Image: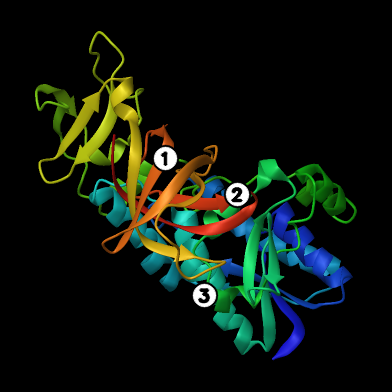
Amino acid sequence: MNNKRVVVGMSGGVDSTVAAYELKRMGYEVIGVNMRLWQDPYLEDAHLMHEGGCCSLSAVEDARRVCAQIGIPFYALDFKAVFKETVVDYFIDSYEKGETPNPCIACNKFVKFDALLEKAKQLGAYYVATGHYAKIDFNEASQRYEIHQSDAVEKDQTYALYNLTQAQLAHILMPLGSFKSKDEVRAIAAQFDIQIAGKSDSQEICFIPDDDYVGFLSRNGNSEMREGDFVSTSGDVLGKHQGIARYTVGQRKGLGVTFGKPMYVVGIDVVNNRVILGDNEAVFSETVYADTVNFIPFEDFKDGYACQAKIRYSAQAASCKLYHHKQGIKVVFEMPQRAVTPGQAIVFYDDTLLIGGGTIRKHKK
């Protein structure tokens, strides 16, 4: 493989565009690839199909145009099968299990840094690159690759990268990690494409351009839209819910029932098709259990390992300690955390260093 050749995943947005531009400026031989991931056959809104995010038709044309302006070859490649199997099917299955999935993490693990990396090798490229805000370094002392938070703290995306392996990191470039702000990135894009520079940030779930995840689940075969009981933490029936996939831990609004006081979702009982409600205090948990764990700067740890953890992308990192537990880990927080949600990722840090993470399965006070 040519160790100066790099395949850049091009979404037609400002971040991937500037990533490709910067890598060419650095002297790499850059190839732009748009990954055709998903097209909802049931989505009737033609505008959303054409304009709705990185899976839309316009994204392909935007990516093709900027590649021509940068002066790099462009390919549109079909990754629909692997995306459906590893991201969409996982997304639907998670809701059927009463969990709240994180499709971006699954896409990074199985598509962008697995399937795309294999395609890059077929094209003779040594690297793949994306527009993620994160920094990859090699630690000479440990002889391991590390991921550090982006210099643009408000844009940092390391939370969604905890699953990356040493073998993958050896072949990944993320040139936006050293930028101080998104404004700096937009300014570079504006030098050669005003339209791209002005694009808004992509939405959270790229394959649901109308933002109606309940409608998406219904259209794509989710069975957990049947009515069931709202129950209290002591088991008393409080009313009827409209399908467990409509609810997530910590939710207060949109329950469709009034109780005379604020009530929050504190759990999902899939077996009995029940949504468990409690007061605000019941939403806090001190202990979290996770599996499918991956660590980056080391392979294992000693019980009582002190670090910080985030229980969701937008959460503040909080002090905790890690312990081995059966097939996964137990995380004990110094202060209880609000709305720990099964199916979401819990991700660990040592200051700016991304340590790793896992999938939340259960929690307790």
Residue 345 x/y as whole percent: 43, 51
Residue 333 shows which numbered tag? 1
* Mark 3 residue type: Asp
* Circle 2 Cα neighbour tier, 10 Å, few/some/many (<14 / 14–19 / ≥20): some
Quarter placement of the C terminus: top left
Q: Nearer the viewer, residue 234 or 229?
A: 234
| Residue at (37, 68) in percent of width and height | 85
* C-alpha gap between disc 3 and disc 2: 27 Å
Q: Nearer the viewer, residue 194 or 4?
A: 4
Residue 130, compared with residue 49, is above or below; it is below
Label 2 sits on residue? 51
* Mark 2 residue type: Glu
- Quarter location, residue 28: bottom right
Q: Is residue 229 left or right of residue 149?
A: left
Residue 237 x/y as whole percent: 10, 23
| Residue at (69, 91) in percent of width and height | 1
Outermost residue toward the top in this view: 260
Residue 98, compared with residue 252, is above or below; it is below
* Mark 1, secondary structure of its residue: strand
Label 3 sits on residue? 114
Q: Earlier in the sequence, mark 3 or mark 2?
A: 2
Asked if the residue at tag 1 contacts the one at tag 2, i.e. Cβ–Cβ closer than 8 Å, the answer is no
* Mark 2, secondary structure of its residue: helix
